[in-house]
Amino acid sequence: MKMKKMMNAAVASRYFAFFITVFLFLVLYGVGMMNFRGFTRPQVFFNLFIDNATLIIVTVGITFTLLIGGIDLSVGAVVALACMILAYLLEYTAVPVAAAVLLVLAFGIAFGALQGYIITKFDMQPFIITLAGMFFCRGMTAVISRDTISITNPFYVSIASARISVFGLGFVSIGAVMALLVLLIAAIVLGFTRFGRTIYAIGGSESSAALMGLPVFRTKVLVYTINGFCAALGGVAYSWIMLSGYTLHALGMEMDAIASSVIGGTLLTGGVAFLPGTLFGVLIQGVILTFITFQGTLSAWWTKIVIGALLCVFIVMQAIITERKSKLSSKSSLENRL
Amino acid sequence: MNWKRITSSSLFLPLLALFALLLFNVIFVDGFLSIQMTEDGRLYGRLIDILNRSSSLIVLSLGMTFVIATSGIDISVGAVVAISAAVVCTLIGGRGDGVAEHPMALAILAAVAIGVLCGIWNGFLVARLKIQAVVATLILMTAGRGIAQLLTAGQIITVYYKPFSYISGTIPGNVLPTNIFIAAAMVLLVGFIMKKTSIGLFVQAVGINATASKYAGISVSLVLFVVYAFSGFCAGVSGLIESSLIRAADANNAGLNMEMDAILAVALGGTLLSGGKFYIGGSVIGAITIQTLTTTMYALGIASDQLPVIKAIAVVVLCLIQSKKCQALVASWKENRHGGSAGKTVEKA
Amino acid sequence: MEQVLLEMRQIDKLFPGVRALSKVDFTLRAGEIHSLMGENGAGKSTLVKVLTGVYPRDGGTIRLNGHEIAPRTPKEAQEYGISTVYQEVNLCANLSVAENIYIGREPKKHGFIDWKTMNERAVTLLKRLHITIDVTKTLDHYSVAIQQMIAIARAVDVSARILILDEPTSSLDEQETQRLFAIVRELKAQGMGIIFISHFLEQVYALCDRVTVLRNGELIGSYEVAHLSRLELIAKMIGKNLSAVQEMDQTEEKSQPSADVFLAAKDIGCTGSLVDVDLAIHKSEVVGLAGLLGSGRTETAELLFGIHSITKGEIDINGKKLNISDPMTAMRKKIAFCPEDRKVSGIIGDLSVRDNIILAMQAKDGMLKHIPYARQAEIADEFIRLLQIKVSDREQLVKNLSGGNQQKVIIARWLATQPELLILDEPTRGIDVGTKSEIQKMAVQLAKQRGMAVVFISSEMDEMTRTCTKLVVMKDRRKVAELMDDEVNSENVMKAIAGGEKE
């Protein structure tokens, strides 16, 4: 009885999904340490951040859209296009590195704003517009170049390969630092600004938010704009890892990002997300990938299947929690009466 | 007088687009209309080629039409095509001596069955667990390619067994490629189902007003379930055709971008993406139109991976044209331009 | 006397084809709780929406503290000090209690939200309303009653002059309602003007000082609650429809019920919506479910048709116990149900009249059978003729028909299934008088000529007394009386609803 009550309290807690995610991460990491000696090296942990810098940034962006009950399927393609634009500008033009990066970021902002405007102004389903956005960006990547363009700009390569030591235990890349910075800023925006709370309110109930006098239209367009910016920034981080532009870069990353976000506790119906949770969502995927690499015989496509399965499990779990919660609230109202 | 009836017909827009494309081809592509016969009695020519290539898209858009009519979406069809292709090719096997490891009939049956299974899975998520259609089918969209790779062990399996190529090729003695017949048979099958069952009516009812449908005694979740299962079935058949075309299973590229083409075909065919009334004939013409567009673009030297740019723009434009909000905006804009002053006086009074 | 806070004079509101409000006056004083009453479509919510700027008015003036105002949006109304709390809580369930109160107006420190101050303020504010809860928990942790009070707290804090409560108690139980009332009285004591809209008579008598009654968009009058008996109030709300009275002579004789019971409901109930209802429906009988809106009329009908499942009691059909778990089970037992909300749960707007008529028949036949087109056309034409549905042809889209004809199409849909029990929930709402009397006559004829059992639900008393031989009177989700034959008249119904109070 007491056990059950505690369970209910845990399920009802706002951080329930977060705890599960952290727990899952620790278990996975623990299993890895037991099976592979390499896992015990601190650098393996830091590599999770180096390898997944892009995914962290993109996940932060997509979490904004999921929070308002929307979705953005175009992020993976935007990452690819961003890499391609960078590679093209750096290799075939005289545009300086800083300008190239700024140009790419400006493109991400403009593209996100356009998608957001079309979705909000014309009341379109976000998935269809962003699905079109995904195909558009993939196609544009191929329009710029169908072949891989390697980035050889010495300054750019030096940024990409720069390593920052962490207490002498290991090192991280600039991309990883940038990813954590984005995560931090986003968490502050979501938690401590009026804009951030309005995003939550819209996700909770768009009509209520409007009745409470909150700026719904502006906020929604801004959310897609932020997402576009994050995707482009993710693209910059991705180019530091790949040092190339290629049409098939970041294929299916939208799914990885959505999965990370959901595993981290984001509700696909909107209104609920916890950014530290989404970080662990990314790290869980990273651990699985590391697993598969260490294992050696398992093939890469297992990642996709496992992530799909994980996403599925978490979505079903969300459905159950939501049901449980509604039962709980009717119960609590009963208790209030007595 | 009759002109208005023609332009308001649901088939007008897709037919117009198709004719415009065909006209363009007739003018700019030499021998576009010519159809010749080879020595072994097969017909060949660009038109036949377009039909041959569009048959898998026709099949796919049949299933997609129903899904969209219920105001849902199935973005997993491309991945299901890859799975189906992987199954059929793995079962027949890539033996160099051209011998099938399993009977082809069995392989075909298994491929279609796995498509249905995928559809049932989607249907379960959407109808039973009430997960949004995009998300439910997104799972299979990405995981599906992984599954396909798992089946083919990451290899591209090339099938040398001769009869396998007949699915999308010509059976000796026939005049036209088999897949054209398959697509035609599927269209006829759907037509038959529309005529002899009430599924079409129920699908529309659910897409227009699910609550009222429930009050009229329709089992909404059953309708959704059947619709997604059928979409899976179509993707399974489409996978057969696709794999036979290249006589191989390529988990990465089979059915790539086909979900977009199918959605575009349905939208072009006049079915609203918000659900409700659907037009099978429109979707078929839409599919042929898109294949013609693809072929034309290839002829113009645009590569297959660049093509999505044009298709993406087409989808957005079609969506905007269909959107009620956009129509209302255009209407009020027109009113402001023509009768703006009249409207204002009314407001003041 | 307290000072006048709000004065609405000669308010007009037109909708295409309908005069929703005509020359309505309304006066609200500071420190009073004023009830706005009237049946569905009387114009209460239209009046409130004009006041809060949801609809622009077509005539009349609104004065607040003597100054003329013209709010154009709910936000502007709020700035004038007019806030509304709706029946469905318009807050965000995923945000904390404190946030729901302060979102959009959060206290800030160094440009960032000061959560500590916000939570403290929320606690203080709620304490004033005698609510002590954890304000950092999300809203969905609390019952609807608490949520309702939080909504009031927000409204009061945003602007504290006029508070409109639009059916705030419809999903609350007795104790929760009492708690809410205590808060409302508190606010009254602080000098706020409160407009209270409710269908529950007892609550109006328990809480309100004055009541303004509307009927068909017209003002009937404003009264001191203490000097108005329940019976008088109900009579003013329901009134006598003159045109209907004139048509009385043309009405057919009532149908005589047979001795066979078609459906017997024994002590049926459903948690949260209905308590212990007993009901026997005979063949050839027209049974009326009377009562004010929200009394449990529709809920009873929905249980009989399997939209919701009963959680208590049993339903027998032709003497056999049956578990009606979904509409199809009910339909197989030849039960038909025309729902209350035509647009949402009735018509399939983008389908043709023919499709709409054969839909239930087709659903009964199942997915795999198909009624041939020729037969569909035949059925559709038959009912178009029989019910005199005005259509250009049977392929016309049903959304393009008038309300009355849409209603006929839905009735046709169910008659096509040849039911033995036909439930009509508000079949005459929002349709013209001519069609109204046609539908009434039809209900009687079906019972007489085809031996059909009919359940008739309506807010218009005359309609019911003219067609029904038995009236089941509902109040607060319970059955309070059953009137037979000669007892069937509006006076008895009003008495039953008013309860205990005899004249």
Image: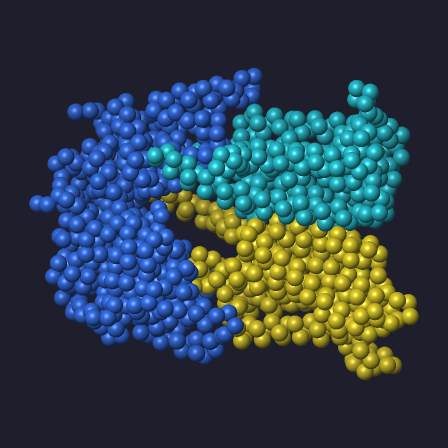
Chain colours: A cyan, B yellow, C blue
The residue closer to the viewer here, B200 or A48, is A48
Say above or below: A163 vs C428: above
Q: Is residue C67 visible?
A: no
The answer to which quarter of the image holds residue A69 is top right
Instruction: Describe residue C247's horizontal placement relative to residue C377 as left or right.
Output: left
Q: Give the residue at the far front of this rendering.
A: A1
Say above or below: C108 vs C414: above
Say above or below: B37 vs C352: below
The answer to which quarter of the image holds residue A93 is top right
Instruction: Describe residue C92's horizontal placement relative to residue C78 as left or right.
Output: right
- Provide residue A83's location: percent of width, then percent of height: 79, 39
Q: Give the residue at the far right of this rendering.
A: B97
- Provide residue B99's location: percent of width, then percent of height: 87, 72
Count the numbered circles shown.
0
Q: Is residue C496 visible?
A: yes
Q: Kindly identify the residue that appears in the image at 35 percent across and 46 percent down.
A: C272
Q: Kindly identify the residue that appears in the image at 22 percent across and 47 percent down.
A: C215
Instruction: Describe residue B205's horizontal placement relative to residue A144 as left or right.
Output: left
Image quadrant occupied by the C terminus of chain B: top left
Q: Give the residue at the far left of this rendering.
A: C503
Q: Kindly identify the residue that appears in the image at 21 percent across and 53 percent down.
A: C473
The residue closer to the viewer here, A240 or C60, is A240
The residue closer to the viewer here, A233 or C4, is A233
- Provide residue B159's location: percent of width, then percent of height: 85, 66
- Provide residue B64's location: percent of width, then percent of height: 62, 61
Q: Kindly identify the residue that appears in the image at 84 percent across and 26 percent down.
A: A162
